[in-house]
Image (cartoon, rainbow, N blue to C red):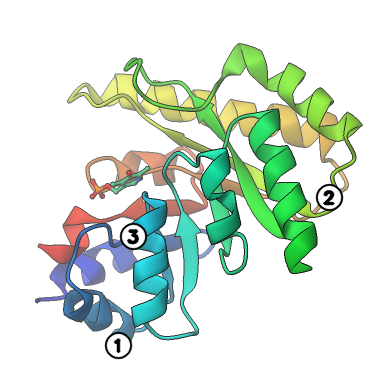
Amino acid sequence: MNLNGLKQVKSLLPEHCQLIVVSKTRPLNQIMDLYNAGERNFAENRVQNLIERKENLPEDIRWHLIGHLQTNKVKYVVPFVHLIHSLDSIKLAEEIEKQSIKNGRVVNCLIQVHVAAEETKFGLGVDEIDQFIEEFLLKKLTHIQLCGVMGMATNTRNTEHIRNDFRKIYQTFLHLKNNYFKHNDLFSSISMGMSSDYKIAIEEGSTMVRIGSLLFE
Ligand SMILES: *Cc1c(COP(=O)(O)O)cnc(C)c1O
């Protein structure tokens, strides 16, 4: 595998923005190439893949879950996951809390925000965020650390549309930060940007880009 994609991404990444390598279905040896090049943050969108990869790859990898999480699978990821990017319901939060207590962990989560035009994508609409966060805070869940938001732009070639989607995600982050997390330094992450749109995401304030295909080509 050549590492040109990695070099390109790294050269464009501001200091405040972290690269999350999306390994998905890639073979272990290719993932190891990126590990050996210094990468330590890897993400999967399916729980089954996340578990398999964790078992077969070095211990010091920080594993991120970026896909939809069903409540019945929470117990498999909570023991080791570094960051869940896809928190989008109170029911899911309660199950993460329950499993985190069992494991004696505090689990980091991002609230998934839905701004894209596609209806199939998961996440909370901008108009649902306040109700979610108020209910979440009322429950006083002590084993979940909310760290920010995650979102995806519409899958389109219209860069202004993409930019506008990222702005909505950024604005949602700011709204939450200013209204609920002003004094919580841990609420600081904006996970947005993939291979096709990460440059725009960085311009619009991303602190975490989730990149797959570009790195494995
Ligand atoms: C697959 C995936 C990515 C990475 O997409 P690429 O186009 O391969 O960079 C990022 N985020 C999520 C949620 C994904 O499912």
Question: Do the residues bearing badges 2 and 3 touch, measured as CB atoms within 8 Å?
Answer: no
Q: Nearer the viewer, residue 173 or 88?
A: 88
CB at disc 1 and ligand 1 closer than 8 Å: no
CB at disc 2 and ligand 1 closer than 8 Å: no
Q: Which residue is mark 1?
A: 36
Q: Quadrant of residue 37?
A: bottom left
Q: Residues within 10 Å of mark 2 (few under 14, many from 20)?
A: few
Q: What's the CA distance linking mark 1 and mark 3?
A: 21 Å
Residue sitting at 70 percent across and 30 percent down? 90
Label 2 sits on a secondary structure element that is loop
Q: Which mark is residue 184?
A: 2
Q: Which mark is residue 53?
A: none
Residue farthest toward the front in the current orientation of the protein? 72
Q: Quadrant of residue 116?
A: top left
Marked residue nearer the N-terminal end (1 or 2): 1
The answer to whether residue 119 shows anywhere in this view is yes
Q: Amino acid at mark 1?
A: Asn
Note whether 31 is above or below 201 in the view shown.
below
Residue sitting at 86 percent across and 51 percent down? 142
Question: Do the residues bearing badges 1 and 3 touch, measured as CB atoms within 8 Å?
Answer: no
Q: What's the CA distance linking mark 2 and mark 3?
A: 33 Å
Where in the figure is residue 76, as x and y percent of width and height?
54, 59
Q: Which mark is residue 49?
A: 3
Q: Viewed as shown, does residue 48 lie left or right of 177? A: left
Residue sitting at 10 percent across and 76 percent down? 2
Q: Viewed as shown, does residue 109 lie left or right of 47? A: right
